[in-house]
Amino acid sequence: MSLTLEQKQAIVSEIATVAAEAPSVIAAEYSGLSVAELSILRNSARDAGVFLKVVRNTLASRALEGTNFDCMREGLVGPLLLAFSNDEPGTAAKVIRDFSKENEKLIVKLVAIEGKLLEVGDLNRLANMPSLLESRSMFLGVLQAPITKLVRVLSEPEAKFVRLLAARRDQQQAA
């Protein structure tokens, strides 16, 4: 069924809006996947907050024009789906990586983050990036470590003295 001009413009504007706010995008070839498998992928993407769209390459190329992902336009060849991360850069990569482990028919073709086209092999590196919450907790752990060590060092003389007194008491009670 052919799309009308208004429908095409709506698709282009929707993708352009999502692309303007997304930190990363993955383009993957989905040929050979059944409708049930695509539904599973869509559900996992929705649960993770990933915008997943199957769109014609010409419309996707027009939508990505002038965005951070303009670098992907030349690689849009074949039946592709686009997965945009909404908040965290690695979210879409995690969804696509996990799904492609189970379904070898989903083949990653393009990976881009913040306007830079990456190698397809960098998908795992992008998927393993810590989320914002994980990054904050690691940073707080790094900040907390010196303070914890300082408190231990400062409290050790008193603790040593208390242990000495307890040992002396036990020695006198034994005698």
Image: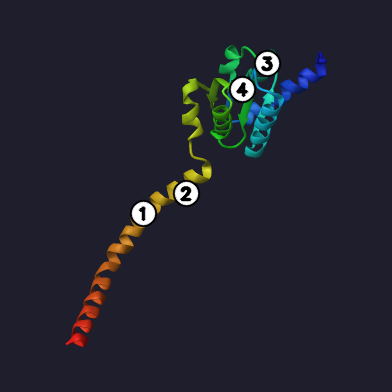
Which is more toward the observer, 103 or 50? 103
Q: Secondary structure at mark 4?
A: loop
Mark 3 or mark 2: which comes first in sequence?
3
- Picture coordinates of residue 116 (x, y %)? 51, 22
Q: Label 3, label 2: how many angstroms apart (C-alpha)?
A: 40 Å
The dot on residue 62 is 3
The dot on residue 145 is 1
Are there few (<14), some (14-19), or many (20+) residues within 10 Å of tag 1? few
Residue 131 lies, with reference to residue 28, above or below; the image says below
Quadrant position of the N terminus in the picture: top right
Which residue position is annotated with label 2? 137
Mark 1 or mark 3: which comes first in sequence?
3
Q: Secondary structure at mark 2?
A: helix
The dot on residue 67 is 4
Query: For the point 36% across and 54% down, which residue is it?
Result: 145
Question: Left of 26 or right of it: where is 149?
Answer: left
- Mark 1 belongs to which amino acid? Ala
